[in-house]
Image (cartoon, rainbow, N blue to C red):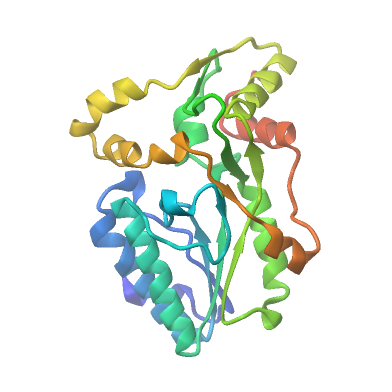
Amino acid sequence: MQAADVAAAAKGCAVIVHAVNPPGYKRWAELVLPMLDNTIAAAKQEGALVVLPGTVYNYGPDAFPLLKENSPQRPLTRKGAIRVEMEARLRTHAARGGKVLIVRAGDFFGPSAGNNWFSQGLVQPGKPVSRIQNPAVAGVGHQWAYLPDVARNIVELLARRDTLAPFATFHLGGHWDADGKQMAEAIRRVLQRHGVEAKVAAFPWWLMRLIAPFNTTLRELMEMRYLWQKPVRLDNAKLRSTLGQEYVTPLDQAVEATLRGLGCLPG
């Protein structure tokens, strides 16, 4: 939020990765866009390329189920509208001579990531897992993205940045959970290999609905529930055409590293 601090941190940088959000979804409407404006100002000062990890919040049901880079962005939620405005400001920045790379992915998970559905919904960090709470609807697909894979694909794109459009967007395929059960089952398999038996249960949406009016974070999470009720998948054809492949860690390996990093495995 401090423009001078952002400018000082960006001094001499060729790339600025704008991977920041207000914690707990709090004060999004008043903080998100000023934060981005400070990044854009620093990028102008340094002639740096701005990388934005994109979300599926930008889209409404009219674009589902398969999202391409040129799919219409007509969100139904406040956070979705803010994300659309973020990308509009970056597009304007690119039109004025800047450079932007947006890499859109599914729900993040990874060894040190705390603000996501994996570590806030399916398991509880820092303790043994006896119960896996699955927020998905049975039979409804959901997309996940392992953060080290997101980073590697971004790095590979940056290595080719001189060939990219000034405003370049790419979608990651990541891990597609075709029936809404595969992520929870992968967690259960990994735990079994470590001698832990865990049960898979439905995430208590009913309880969240009761508490949400009194809790900002839960209220914001409830607003995004529609992304669990319909299949939403990102088409990575453009990325594969550019890189020749998408770099994806096998699911069980990614889940094991994540559980270990979150302190959920024995020993």
Residue sitting at 61 percent across and 48 percent down? Answer: 147
Residue 5 position in % (x across, y down): 37, 72
Q: Is residue 178 above or below residue 16?
A: above
Q: Decide if residue 112 is in sight here.
A: yes
Instruction: Tell me where residue 16 appears, x and y as whole percent.
Output: 52, 71
Judge from the rendering whether residue 166 lies leftward or rightward of residue 194; answer left or right: left
Left or right: residue 163 compared with residue 11: right
x then y, percent, for residue 112? 56, 41
Left/right placement of residue 44 relative to residue 250 reads left
Identify which residue is drawn at 48% across, 54% down: 63
Q: Quadrant of the N terminus?
A: bottom left
Outermost residue toward the front? 62
Residue drawn at point x = 38 percent, y = 37 percent: 225
The quarter of the rendered structure image containing the C terminus is top right
* Residue 264 lies in quadrant: top right
Q: Nearer the viewer, residue 56 or 34?
A: 56
User: In front: 110, or 134?
Assistant: 134
Above or below, comparing residue 206 to residue 51 in the picture: above
User: Is residue 6 in view?
Assistant: no
Image x and y of residue 194, in percent: 71, 16
**Front residue of 127 and 234:** 234
